[in-house]
Image: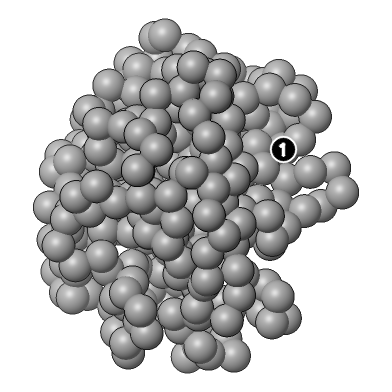
Amino acid sequence: AGTVAVLGGCDGGGNIDALFRFWVAYIDTSTGTHDLWRATATVTGAEIQAERIDDNPSIEMSPGVQQGDANRMIAYASDRDGNWEIYSIHGGLGGGTPTRLTNDPAIDWEPCWSGDDQRIAFQTDRDGNHEIYSMKADGTDLQRLTNNTAFDGSPAWWAFDQIAFTSDRDGNMEIYVMDADGTNVRRVTNDAALDGSPAWRHDGNRIAFQSNRSGNFDIWAAAPDGSGLTQMTDGPDSDTSPTYTKTGFDLLLFQRQSPGGATDIYATPDDAAGLWQLTTTGTAFTPDAGVSSQEAVLASR
């Protein structure tokens, strides 16, 4: 068992309800490898107990949480069978038995769920370079969504019909959006910096992403057409891997790495008025967020 300290309070004009309850899944490296853990907390600041979901000597990475209210399933990447594959597991206490969804000698990575939780998009190099594929939640009906010589990865699914992703097809890493079948690709960002790890706000009107356009990595957000660009975080730390809670609270979570190397998960309202440090372990990575009723879900990829 372990603990995660959730430091809260609604200061700085933040509009988060004090009863906003987080169901937390994250990666912890305290055992010497990357393990998938879960915990529960509210933003009021109680210290919480955590338990490991997938107790396996392999490495677990890049989990993606279901968007709907029902099952709280987590898809994630693991090398437990000798190479990187996509698995799913229940995010509740005990976790249950993981289900293997892909079976290919390639690297399968960074899964994310569709809005109806019926499909999973993921990044794979099975065609010689990194492309985006989707499949049904049971691993069947594999479909290739991107097809070019560039890097395409880090998919983020909004509702049923839009996927944001990262690509260097125009010479450097930018954010793009495409329809869920891979058609109608549109460029969102256009900057000499490295833009990556897109995340949709629940209403589909904003995309948060990481960028080093200010000199170090911070979180930025823009409309899907690239307008309304806003810097969400600023400072000497490296802020990456944003995610929005999938509800009307519009809480933006991200990973912050200090100059000393400690990495924890932070949260800010969508108007950036207020900041909450959610973990203090120094080993929590890359949050992904969802909501079930009045509960939010955090995961670390």
Is residue 151 among the parts visible in the rendering?
no
Residue 135 horizontal/vertical position (percent): 21, 65
Residue 181 horizontal/vertical position (percent): 17, 45
Q: Is residue 95 above or below residue 229?
A: below
Q: Is residue 283 above or below residue 243?
A: below
Is residue 49 among the parts visible in the rendering?
yes
Nearer the observer, 143 or 109: 109
Residue 188 horizontal/vertical position (percent): 40, 22
The residue that appears at 67% across and 72% down in the rendered structure is 29
The residue that appears at 57% across and 86% down in the rendered structure is 58
Q: Along the horizontal axis of the image, is 57 left or right of 124?
A: right
> Can you tell which quarter of the image residue 126 is in?
bottom left
User: Mark 1 sits on what residue?
Assistant: 238
> Can you tell which quarter of the image residue 144 is in?
bottom left
Q: Residues within 10 Å of mark 1 (few under 14, many from 20)?
A: many
Secondary structure at numbered mark 1: strand
> Can you tell which quarter of the image residue 186 is in?
top left
Q: Which residue is outermost to the top?
A: 228
Residue 290 horizontal/vertical position (percent): 31, 50
Q: Amino acid at mark 1?
A: Ser
The residue that appears at 58% across and 30% down in the rendered structure is 275
Quarter holding the N terminus?
A: bottom right
Q: Along the horizontal axis of the image, is 246 left or right of 129?
A: left
